Image (cartoon, coloured by chain):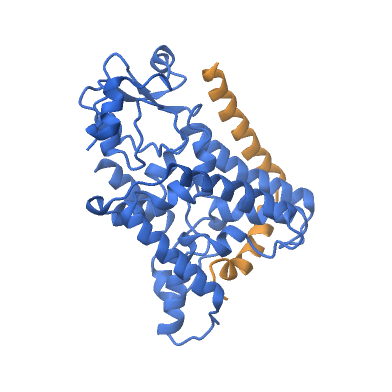
Chain colours: A blue, B orange
Amino acid sequence: MKRRIWQVAAAIALNPFPLNLIRGRIYQGPLKHICVPALNCYSCPAAFGACPVGSLQVTLASVRGWFSGMAAWAAAAASLYVAGVILLAGAVGGRLACGWVCPFGLLQELIFRRRLSLRLPVTARYLKYAMLAGLIIAAPLLLPYPSSPLFCKLVCPAGTIEAGAPLVAYDRLARVGAFDLGWLFAWKASLAVAIMAGAVLISRFFCRVFCPLGAAWGLFNRISLVAIDVDRSKCTRCGFCRGVCPVDIYIYEDSGSPECVRCFNCTRCPESAVRVVLRTSPAGRRDGVHEGGDITKQGQHAKSGGAK
Amino acid sequence: MRRFLTVAAVAAAAAVLLAGLLLGDIGVVWQKAALICLECIGIG
């Protein structure tokens, strides 16, 4: 519950202009230069800041002279700023922002129905790395005509839901007629509906399968400042951690898993075996982060049904 | 070792962020981003 309060507070803080939703405007003041550590669309009428995923695509493409026509070195420096925001958030918390800040993660948690839940195939998680490497980094740098950020344009449901839908609704309700909707909006709307349907059935579906930001931050989970420590002398491998985990992992198997969104639900462990540590603290150094290792017979038992 | 990596990662990330802030003219990029954003979200 405490985390939910943080998530709601973060969503409000990142979107302090809700009246823009009914005015059909996008805030474009100086605060928009701030890159926020969450998938919160630049184009959302209520948003004050810029999404790092969209920003990175734009700044990288600008290095080659696309979009802005600015000097390559200046665009490269802007890319450094955006990359720095992503890297710093990752180095400090790994995927901490996924679990505590990202409004799109909150939305998925709100619509997920555990009664209907399905298990995600393990291989599906690798798609988000392809998104990160292909659409976010390679496409802006290599494609001959990166006419717009491809991930935002072709995939991102956050943009469709937070920005496209309210703007189109305003456009139609106020009879402005500014938008000529075509195949692209139809595709984006269909994909957003499909991903949201997936999120009803599979906890944090988008985060686990598609999100390039989560993919980048997940790479830091093993070395991030804020970490999860599992005391193996206390852990009974009962499977409680997996039962409360939004991304279905056994934290005692790998506390640095790139999939972990650092929600810390697992710290409610009945054996008090799981806790949050700062990796530079003496406690964090003493215990380390006990990763990997054998899965005991108890663990295998939990995996096969003890985690209900 | 891992502690060293943690500190190095935080320091390096902060350095990258600061370099970008000090050297870049991010406002220009964002002005252009505002123009293309409608296409990015599937409208316009």
Return the residue nearer the eye: A158 or A36.
A158
- Which residue is located at x 78 percent, y 52 percent? A72
Q: Is residue A264 left or right of residue B5?
A: left
Return the residue nearer the eye: B26 or A170.
A170
A13 in relation to A251, above or below:
below
- Which residue is located at x 33 percent, y 34 percent? A264
Q: Is residue A70 left or right of residue A214?
A: right
Residue A146, position in %: x, y? 70, 61
- Which residue is located at x 44 percent, y 32 percent? A257
A39 in relation to B39, above or below:
above
- Which residue is located at x 34 percent, y 39 percent? A248
Residue A81, position in %: x, y? 63, 45
Quadrant for residue A139, please give it. bottom right
Residue A160, position in %: x, y? 47, 66
Is residue A45 visible in the rendered image? The answer is no
Q: Quadrant of the C terminus of chain A?
A: top left
A70 in relation to A216, above or below:
below
Q: Quadrant of the N terminus of chain A?
A: top left
Count of numbered marks: 0
B29 in relation to A23, above or below:
above
Is residue A8 visible in the rendered image? The answer is yes
Q: Is residue A166 left or right of residue A185?
A: left
